[in-house]
Image: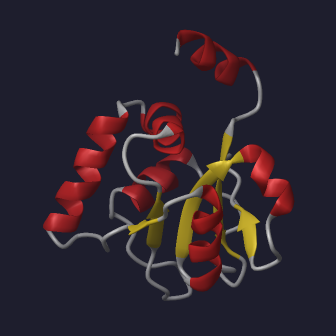
């Protein structure tokens, strides 16, 4: 785990955020914006479409990357925060995708969707999904 963290800090990110290509409201995202999206503070895109996050189940690598690199917390703490915000009605319940390929399919099918996939898969995205770079 320590070596993976060192490698991630030294090189390009092992994961990327993707969004539906029809969502023209945002071309890049800051870490602060990502935190707002994944905790329900941002409920709508500027186009008026509902923000819908797509996550793999559990505390897998993608959520671990998001929690540690973007939020600076443990995956468990991030997932707890998401559950709390869903329970309070502050954010839509995440779509749970069984695989990275399913994450891509969900992002393609839901206009306001945003998901996490391994960076190497970004080269194989269909035209209906695009990478949302974190700046």
Question: Where's residue 7, x and y in %?
Answer: 69, 17
- Left or right: 52 with respect to 122? left
Snapshot quadrant of residue 93: bottom left
Q: Nearer the viewer, residue 132 or 59?
A: 59
Question: Where's residue 126, x and y in %?
Answer: 80, 73
**Residue at left 32%, top 74%?**
92
Snapshot quadrant of residue 72: top left
Snapshot quadrant of residue 46: bottom right
Name, please, the residue furthest toward the front.
98
Name, please, the residue furthest toward the right.
123
Q: Which colouring convention does the figure follow?
A: secondary structure
Question: Where's residue 76, x and y in %?
Answer: 29, 37
**Residue at left 56%, top 61%?**
115
Question: Where's residue 28, x and y in %?
Answer: 69, 59
- Give the vertical position of 3 relative to 98 (above or below): above
Name, please, the residue furthest toward the bottom.
48
| Number of numbered discs overlaid on the protein picture | 0
Q: Is residue 29 visible?
A: no
**Residue at left 15%, top 66%?**
87
- Left or right: 102 with respect to 38? right
Name, please, the residue furthest toward the left.
88
- Give the vertical position of 114 relative to 110 (above or below): above
- Left or right: 75 with respect to 69? left
**Residue at left 61%, top 57%?**
100
Q: Is residue 19 visible?
A: yes
């Amino acid at each position: 785990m320590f070596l993976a963290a060192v490698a991630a800090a030294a090189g390009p990110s092992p994961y990327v955020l993707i969004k539906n290509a029809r969502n023209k409201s945002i071309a890049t995202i800051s870490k602060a914006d990502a935190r707002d999206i994944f905790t329900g503070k941002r409920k709508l895109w500027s186009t008026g479409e509902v923000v819908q996050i797509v996550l793999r189940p559990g505390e897998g690598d993608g959520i671990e990357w998001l929690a540690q690199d973007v939020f600076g917390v443990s995956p468990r703490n991030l997932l707890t925060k998401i559950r709390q915000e869903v329970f309070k009605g502050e954010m839509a319940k995440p779509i749970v995708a069984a695989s990275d390929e399913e994450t891509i399919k969900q992002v393609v099918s839901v206009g306001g969707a945003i998901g996490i996939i391994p960076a190497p898969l970004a080269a194989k995205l269909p035209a209906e999904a695009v990478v949302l770079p974190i700046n």
